[in-house]
Image: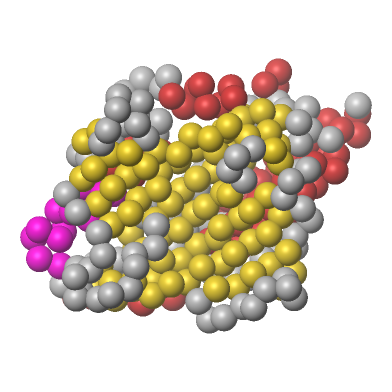
């Protein structure tokens, strides 16, 4: 029991350490409580979570995973790299897209937890954002869905496009805070996870999952913009789906509105 407590403390310190290198505070990959709400994960599971978190943060900072190695069973390209970790896989996507005439990439890690380590209908954790070419060089790992330059390098979006981007970002942030979208309207039945905005759709992902025997949810926004009419490429989803224990999920959803 003493060793388990010590290892869990080291996991918390490791997660804090990787987050400390970020320019802005980030949502960790695994959201869990402390004290009596601390998950009773085994030592092996804690080490896997620590490695997975470190790899996730490394990719967000534009680096290669620290623990997972190149997956020889997958064919990696300039836009898709594949890595195999200890009971998890990482797909680093870097897909060229156009938003209202502005070229950029949807970049970030997509982590697939393997059966046996996790149980659920959905086992994918995703963190993908839009970057212009200039901003991708910086790989600013903030929680923003769109990373664009300011000043003279600001994208040449017209007023309509700018309003769409701002509405998307506001709805995305609202869902991260456990709230409903601010601008997009509910699409379908009252319990539908889909919200329709002007030129975009937000899906609120909330899927039950068990990781290492601990129940929780994969939660967060998945944002899909309508394709740029001047280009035939499909627009990749912008997403921020991470793990919350059941108790942390309750805490997020009952937070009062400021």
Name the foreground residue: 208 vs 52.
208
Q: What segment carries the magenta color?
A: 157-169
Name the foreground residue: 112 vs 245.
112
In the picture, the quarter occupied by the C terminus is top left
Mark yes or no: residue 23 visible.
no
| Lateral position of residue 82 relative to residue 234, left or right | right
Name the foreground residue: 64 vs 160.
160
Q: Residue furthest bottom?
A: 78
Choose top left, top right, bottom left or bottom right for residue 140.
Answer: bottom left
Residue 88 appears at what percent x and percent y? 71, 54
Choose top left, top right, bottom left or bottom right for residue 192.
Answer: top left
Q: Residue at 69% x, 38% y: name it.
A: 119
Q: Residue furthest left?
A: 159
Q: Main secondary structure of the magenta part?
A: helix
Magenta residue check for 230: no
Q: Residue at 37% x, 42% y: name it.
A: 203
């Amino acid at each position: 029991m003493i060793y388990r407590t010590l290892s869990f403390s080291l996991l918390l310190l490791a997660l804090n350490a990787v987050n400390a290198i970020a320019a802005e505070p980030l949502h960790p990959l695994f959201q869990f409580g402390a004290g009596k709400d601390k998950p009773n994960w085994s030592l092996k599971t804690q080490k896997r979570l620590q490695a997975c978190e470190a790899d996730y943060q490394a990719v967000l900072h534009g680096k290669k995973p620290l623990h997972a190695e190149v997956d020889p069973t997958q064919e990696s390209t300039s836009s898709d790299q594949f890595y195999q970790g200890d009971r998890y896989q990482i797909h680093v996507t870097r897909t060229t897209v156009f938003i209202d005439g502005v070229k950029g990439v949807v970049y970030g890690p997509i982590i697939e937890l393997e059966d046996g380590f996790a149980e659920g209908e959905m086992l994918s954790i995703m963190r993908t954002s839009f970057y212009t070419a200039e901003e991708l060089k910086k790989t600013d790992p903030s929680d923003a869905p769109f990373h664009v330059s300011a000043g003279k390098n600001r994208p040449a979006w017209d007023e309509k496009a700018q309003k769409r981007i701002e509405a998307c970002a506001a709805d995305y942030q609202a869902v991260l805070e456990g709230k409903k979208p601010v601008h997009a309207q509910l699409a379908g039945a009252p319990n539908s996870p889909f919200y329709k905005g002007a030129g975009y759709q937000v899906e609120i992902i909330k899927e039950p999952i068990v990781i290492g025997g601990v129940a929780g949810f994969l939660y967060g926004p998945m944002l899909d913009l309508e394709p740029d009419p001047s280009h035939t490429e499909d627009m990749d989803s912008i997403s921020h789906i991470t793990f919350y224990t059941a108790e942390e999920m309750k805490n997020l959803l009952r937070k009062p509105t400021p």
